[in-house]
Image (tube, rainbow, N blue to C red):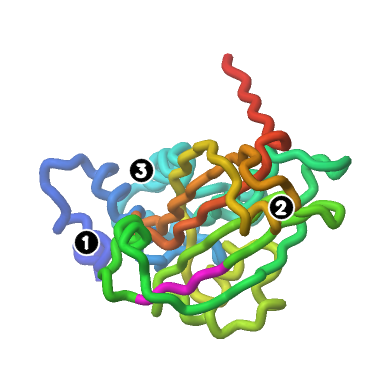
Amino acid sequence: MTQSSSPGRQALELADPRLPLHAKLREEFIGRIRSAEWTPAEPIPPESALAGFYGVSVGTVRRVMGELVDQGLLERRQGDGTYVRRVRLDRALHRFFRHGTAGDTLPDSRIMLREVRNVEAAVAHVLRIAPESQVLYLKRVRSREGDPLLVEDIWLPLPRFEAIARAGLDELGNLLYPAYEELAGQIVGGAREELTVERCGSATAELLGCAEDEPVVVIERIARAHDDTPLERRVTRGRANTFRYRVELT
């Protein structure tokens, strides 16, 4: 089989003819990421192998790889190859909620409730699922040094996360996104967060060990797959007096 008739080359020839070759290759690679053909668990094929499969130069492949690394879709691991990048959102909030002397150590996790529910209209809207759908609901408390720090309400669409509903709680671990990937095959590729402040309700106050009506910071996160499919709605609440936000602009 010649390079010009290879399956990879044929795929590029079927792409929008108005696009230059490197742009066609870039869309092809993004498609393989979004379809989960390439995942964070295994290195993607070497540049030379991809160049041969698609019938293009190694330089073209290297250029596209560099663009996807800059975009945050891929990451290069020294001596180990190139991988689809895992987002590290589970640690993000803990830079801003401080408690005790633990610094940046990851809080402990305890799932207080796990149940299948009929979806509420607001959750169905953000997860882009039908209003008659069911979701898996988790109530989780994060603690440091034995003291509650964050309370989280989490909604996951079913049957996509059926494996999370069936797994033992000890299988879910301290971080949920690795469990989503390992148990349910769902890879979080990005998220949008919105921050507000509200007065603490009685149920949250009891879990956080604070006074009812005390100010709490509320962070709503919509996590999505690489193909932009919503995977999770998460609402995190923490005491406002433990919240610190710092950004350095240069």
- How many other residues sit within 10 Å of disc 3, few (<14), some (14-19) or many (≥20)? some
Q: Earlier in the sequence, mark 2 or mark 1?
A: 1
Label the magenta part by its dominant secondary structure. strand
Say whether marks 3 and 2 touch (CB < 8 Å): no
Closest to the observer: 242 or 82? 242
Q: Which residue is mark 2?
A: 208
In this picture, which residue range is highlighted in magenta? 134-138
Closest to the observer: 167 or 219? 219
Task: Name which residue lies at 61% across and 24% down.
Answer: 247
In the displayed structure image, the side of residue 135 where residue 124 appears, left or right: left
In space, the residues marked 3 and 2 are separated at their CA atoms by 54 Å
In the displayed structure image, the side of residue 20 where residue 109 appears, left or right: right
In the displayed structure image, the side of residue 64 where residue 42 appears, left or right: right
Residue 213, placed above or below residue 107: above
Q: Which residue is mark 3?
A: 60
In space, the residues marked 2 and 1 are separated at their CA atoms by 54 Å
* Amino acid tagged 3: Thr
What is the x, y in percent for residue 211?
A: 71, 45
Q: Which circle, 3 or 2, is nearer the viewer?
A: 2
What is the x, y in percent for residue 179?
A: 60, 70
Residue reaching furthest to the top:
250
Residue 11's tag is 1
Q: Quadrant of residue 228?
A: bottom left
- How many other residues sit within 10 Å of disc 1, few (<14), some (14-19) or many (≥20)? some
Q: Earlier in the sequence, mark 3 or mark 1?
A: 1
Residue 220's tag is none
Task: Name which residue lies at 39% across and 79% down.
Answer: 159
* Amino acid tagged 1: Ala
